[in-house]
Image (cartoon, helix red, strand yellow):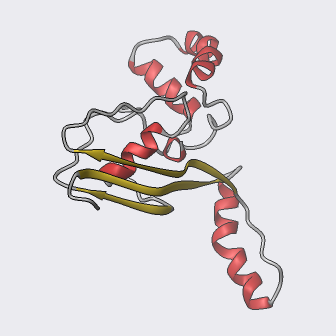
């Protein structure tokens, strides 16, 4: 990393394994090893989702940087990797000095719960009646931009 850069990000990528149901996670853990031992073809029980793919940039001392993008475009994932709270799948990050996360998307949400479960949990905490929360759920999901992933655990977003 050049001495004039305080953040260096090179060819950074993050891939998540998306499982359709919890049983597929167990199958992925066990069956490929058994197939390899038996000499059979291996199969994946997940689909890949690339939240960040081949991103490179440098930030110099005194520079101000903004990261813009639509919901689901990888902004929070990128920042988590820079802060060191999430490991990249590929690429390198170098920082000079201390880096701290000040704001986390979804604070107060359970990472183990699905989006739907978190919507209902937070509606309950806010005192929103269950029937009203269910009535508004479609609008909340549409606004989030996470409709393809709302039934997955939040930790995979």
Residue 107 located left or right of residue 61: right
Tell which residue pokes out farthest to the right in this image. 40
Q: What residue is at 61 percent from the left and 23 percent from the top?
A: 141
Residue 40 rendering spot, x and y as whole percentages: 83, 84
Figure quadrant of residue 37:
bottom right
Residue 113 located left or right of residue 28: left
Residue 102 rendering spot, x and y as whole percentages: 25, 35
Q: What residue is at 74 percent from the left and 85 percent from the top?
A: 36
Figure quadrant of residue 66:
top left
Q: What residue is at 20 percent from the left and 58 percent from the top?
A: 3
In the image, residue 138 above or below residue 30: above
83 or 141, nearer to the observer: 83
Q: What residue is at 25 percent from the left and 45 percent from the top?
A: 60
Residue 55 rendering spot, x and y as whole percentages: 50, 50
Q: How many marks?
A: 0
Tell which residue pokes out farthest to the left in this image. 97
Residue 37 located left or right of residue 157: right
129 or 28, nearer to the observer: 28
Residue 47 rendering spot, x and y as whole percentages: 71, 55
100 or 95, nearer to the observer: 95
Q: Quadrant of the N terminus?
A: bottom left
């Amino acid at each position: 990393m050049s001495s004039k850069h305080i953040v260096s990000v090179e060819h950074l990528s993050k891939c998540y394994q998306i499982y359709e149901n919890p049983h597929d996670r167990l199958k992925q853990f066990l069956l490929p090893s058994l197939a390899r031992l038996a000499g059979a073809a291996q199969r994946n029980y997940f689909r890949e989702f690339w939240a960040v793919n081949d991103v490179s940039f440098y930030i110099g001392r005194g520079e101000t940087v903004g990261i813009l993008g639509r919901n689901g475009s990888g902004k929070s994932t990128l920042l988590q990797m820079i802060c060191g709270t999430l490991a990249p799948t590929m690429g390198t990050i170098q920082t000079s000095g201390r880096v701290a996360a000040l704001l986390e998307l979804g604070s107060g949400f359970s990472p183990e719960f699905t989006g739907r479960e978190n919507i209902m949990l937070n509606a309950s905490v806010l005192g929103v009646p269950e029937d009203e929360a269910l009535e508004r759920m479609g609008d909340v999901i549409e606004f989030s931009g996470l409709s393809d992933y709302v039934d997955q655990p939040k930790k995979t977003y």
